[in-house]
Image (cartoon, helix red, strand yellow):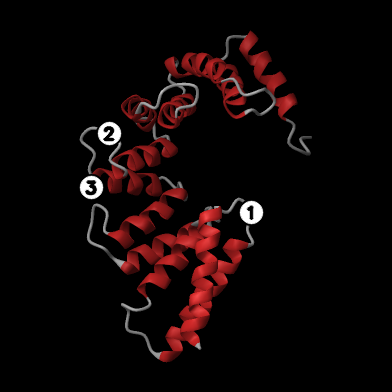
Amino acid sequence: TVTKVNYEKSTEYFKSLLDKDHTKGYLGLGLSFLYGKGQTINYLKAIELLDVAGLRKDIQAMNALGDIYRLGYGVDVNYQRAKDYYFEAAKSDETNALINLGLLHYRKQITGATNELALQYMKTAAEKNNMAAYYWLGIFHDKGVGTAADFKKAELAFKKAIEADVLGAKYKYAQMLYEHLSTIKLSNKKKNNTYLEIRDLLIEYINSPHTSDVNTVYSMYMLGDLYSLKS
């Protein structure tokens, strides 16, 4: 049985598949070179292998190639080319590709980008059960991206992301509550409960792995400010 992560062992299986000219062999070994899992990072080799899998319509490979051109892994950043790969993958319901298309529109990194399409792609990814999409829907509904700002819809989206343990969702939800404290009419009891909710979310975020240094600093600032507001 598989008892622990063993990237070296996984690459052996990928190489066996590659020897049989199996698409998943190209995909698996390509990702190994891309992320340095069982292989030394080699972007050119990753692109070479993923290109083969992508030409065979493997949606994970196409999404990975989109990441390569969006993030500039061994190549010049090319958002339009990234969009093309994501779009092909999204045709077959690759939900990470849908999210990435939404972000390209949201960040205005491609020609013809619109907030409405950003929202549409995120909604489609969420409907297909990619919980990370709810994180972005929370942001979009809070900020009014592609739609009118709606605190309740943002709250529901963030809570779904938190339930799925999406990285950063607790921080973003706490930030939204913090920023809306002065704009929402609350009873003293409700306001106190909101303070406690923000505090707990921020502390849980700070103590979780893989937190952003910048977000951790701002979380500490919000905690300090909350205590000064309560005093």
Q: Residue at x 24, y 39 (%)?
A: 113
**Vertical placement of residue 15 versus 92, above or below:** above
- Nearer the N terminus, badge 3 or badge 2? 2
Which numbered tag is attached to residue 209? 1
Q: Quadrant of residue 173?
A: bottom left
Q: Position of residue 163 (x, y in %)?
A: 53, 60
Which numbered tag is attached to residue 116? 3
**Residue 163, visible in the rendered structure:** no
Q: Quadrant of the N terminus?
A: top right
Q: CA distance from mark 1 to mark 3?
A: 33 Å
Residue that carries the numbered disc 2 in the rendered image = 110
Q: Residue at x 64, y 28 (%)?
A: 36
Q: Quadrant of residue 153?
A: bottom left
- Foreground: disc 3 or disc 2: 2
Q: Residue at x 37, y 30 (%)?
A: 86
Q: Position of residue 89 (x, y in %)?
A: 39, 29
